Amino acid sequence: MMDLRMTQLHFAISIRAPREKVWHTMLGDETYRQWTQVFDASSRFKGDWTEGSKILFLGNDPNGGGESGMVSRIAKNRPYEFISIEHLGILKNGVEDTTSEAAKKWASAYENYTFKEKDGGTELLVDINSDEEFVGMFNDLWPKALQRLKEIAEAA
């Protein structure tokens, strides 16, 4: 069950590229690292996007504590249409944590991405649950990240 302190955030961007290209740009290892640098210069994932599989969203701990990030699973994957990520907990200093209070803040939070054909391109819709503590940061960074994704996907 989603934590009651979670806030639903919505972002959208139009990209002049087919859904398939936007999908692969968003989820491909190399291009994922490029557009998510807005959030963290060391941003990356470990795992795959297959429905039901575990995936780790990683960055280097700014305090030198090793890998940190989110422990998640792919809740739904309809290629080129929709992907849903369910967060299960956090990763701190390379250790997965799904039981502490900090981890429970994220348990059952979702990130949903919808890819729609529109005007010969793609409209990407992003719906995420965020702990109230991070709403301001996400409202600032998500539009920048999506703009970077747009630039990469629209490049030749």
Image: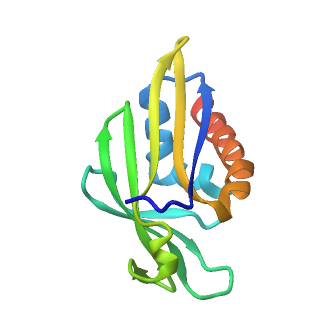
Of 11 and 32, which appears nearest the observer? 11
Quadrant of the snapshot with the C terminus:
top right
Q: Can residue 3 be seen?
A: yes
Please state if 143 lies on the left or on the right of 46 as rendered: right
Tell me how the rendering is colored. rainbow
Q: Position of residue 97 (x, y in %)?
A: 41, 81
**Residue depicted at 52% across the width and 42% down the height:** 127
Res 99 quadrant in image = bottom left
Q: Position of residue 59 (x, y in %)?
A: 57, 71
Of 82 and 80, which appears nearest the observer? 82
Q: Can residue 40 be seen?
A: no
Residue 98 in the image: above or below residue 38: below
Q: Position of residue 132 (x, y in %)?
A: 64, 60
Q: Residue furthest top?
A: 119
Of 148 and 110, which appears nearest the observer? 110
Residue 37 in the image: above or below residue 99: above
Quadrant of the snapshot with the N terminus:
bottom left
Please state if 16 lies on the left or on the right of 19 as rendered: right
Please state if 42 lies on the left or on the right of 103 as rendered: right
Residue 93 in the image: above or below residue 60: below
Q: Residue furthest front?
A: 4
Q: Position of residue 147 (x, y in %)?
A: 68, 38
**Residue depicted at 52% across the width and 15% down the height:** 118
**Residue depicted at 37% across the width and 31% down the height:** 80
**Residue depicted at 51% across the width and 53% down the height:** 30
Residue 151 in the image: above or below residue 36: above
Number of callouts? 0
